[in-house]
Image (cartoon, rainbow, N blue to C red):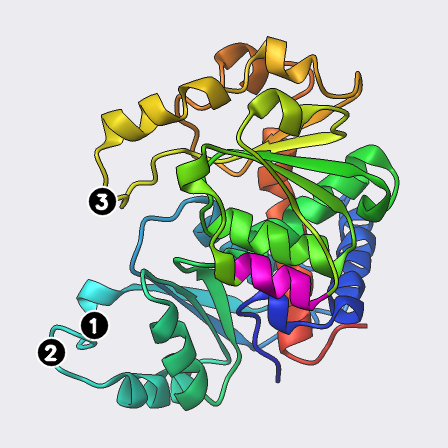
């Protein structure tokens, strides 16, 4: 049994094994329909419990399909439907019940501490479906997508992030250390990654490059990533924040500073941080990016259940 909470805590060798398994599994599904089960039904009889404290579309659907295609089943819970928090039931007691009924637990939460607490009390694997500091399943899937499109290891590519220093960037920075790729970050000074994250990168003898100018960040990029500047639960002046990122909007002109074959990726949902022309253009691969989450999350599940081949 292994947890999947933060890319920082998972050996690079294991992450690469997950990517390799996902590539093989996707290739083997070319002639199968959506709900047809993979050969061997590797997770037959397993129940994945999902709990969402925050809105979810792609994470919820992709894990539903992932466990189904592996031969298992899933049930989705909302925290406001449980005794947890409102009824006064402790995380320890809730974790005991989850471990009794289910075989794995996906948690999407607004608290990093809550993920750690569940990990301490669960006797089944916990997967971080998104927390304030990390979105590991999203970013590992993004690494998969980049390598699929570019047909080469991500370590040989220049990756650029234009946008806020949020949980997705936190996991992308962790991935840059684990997979050894160059990462340029373009954002206003006020929205740079925290000193804690920068020190972790230095501690691992790696380096990230931060620019307060979008053009400088985008130069010679093979891939430009972005995310919604204002998240759903952002407790900020949304209008003001969008204005602060005005010079970091991803448009055709900014893309022209990257390599000619540069691709654009966005984990969705989108906002005003990217123009319609770029988002729906030939360089954009956002729909493939979303689809690939199913394939990678299947391999993450197998890793957690100790069945990764």
Disc with the residue nearer the chain's start (2 vs 1): 1
Q: Which label number is shown at residue 174? A: none
Q: Which residue is mark 1?
A: 82
Return the x and y of residue 135 as percentages of the image width and height. 51, 55
For label 3, count other residues whose C-alpha is less than 10 Å away and answer few (under 14), some (14-19) or many (20+): few
Q: Which residues are magenta?
A: 197-204
Q: Is residue 163 above or below residue 174?
A: above
- Calculate the distance from the C-alpha at mark 3 to the C-alpha at mark 1: 25 Å
Say whether residue 304 is magenta: no
Q: Is residue 112 above or below residue 33?
A: below
Asked where in the image residue 226 lies, by quadrant, the reply is: top right
Q: Quadrant of the N terminus?
A: bottom right
Secondary structure character of the magenta stretch overall: helix
Secondary structure, mark 2, is: loop
Return the x and y of residue 275 as percentages of the image width and height. 49, 14
Secondary structure, mark 1, is: loop
Q: Which residue is mark 2?
A: 87
Q: Residue at x 79, y 34 (%)?
A: 149
């Amino acid at each position: 049994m292994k947890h999947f909470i933060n890319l920082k805590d998972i050996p690079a060798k294991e992450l690469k094994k997950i990517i390799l398994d996902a590539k093989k599994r996707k290739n083997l599904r070319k002639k199968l329909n959506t709900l047809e089960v993979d050969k061997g039904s590797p997770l037959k009889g397993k129940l994945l419990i999902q709990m969402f404290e925050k809105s979810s579309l792609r994470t919820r659907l992709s894990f539903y399909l992932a466990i189904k295609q592996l031969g298992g089943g899933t049930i989705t819970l909302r925290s406001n439907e449980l005794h947890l928090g409102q009824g006064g039931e402790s995380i320890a007691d809730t974790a005991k019940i989850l471990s009794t009924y289910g075989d794995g637990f996906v948690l999407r939460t607004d608290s990093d501490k809550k993920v750690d607490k569940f990990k301490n009390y669960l006797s089944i694997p916990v997967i971080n479906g998104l927390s304030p500091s990390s979105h590991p399943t999203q970013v590992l899937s993004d690494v998969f997508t980049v390598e699929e499109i570019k047909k080469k290891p991500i370590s040989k590519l220049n990756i650029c992030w234009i946008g806020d220093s949020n949980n997705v960037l936190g996991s992308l920075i962790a991935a840059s250390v684990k997979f050894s790729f160059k990462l340029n970050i373009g954002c206003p000074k006020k929205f740079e990654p925290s000193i804690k994250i920068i020190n972790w990168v230095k501690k691992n003898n790696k380096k990230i490059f931060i620019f307060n100018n979008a053009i400088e960040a985008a130069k010679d990029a093979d891939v430009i990533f972005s995310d919604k500047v204002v998240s759903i639960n952002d407790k900020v002046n949304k209008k003001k924040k969008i204005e602060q990122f005005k010079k970091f909007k991803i448009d055709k002109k900014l893309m022209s500073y990257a390599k000619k074959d540069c691709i654009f990726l966005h984990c969705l949902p989108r906002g005003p941080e990217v123009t319609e022309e770029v988002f729906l253009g030939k360089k954009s691969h956002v729909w493939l990016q979303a689809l690939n989450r199913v394939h990678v999350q299947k391999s993450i599940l197998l890793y957690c259940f100790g069945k990764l081949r």
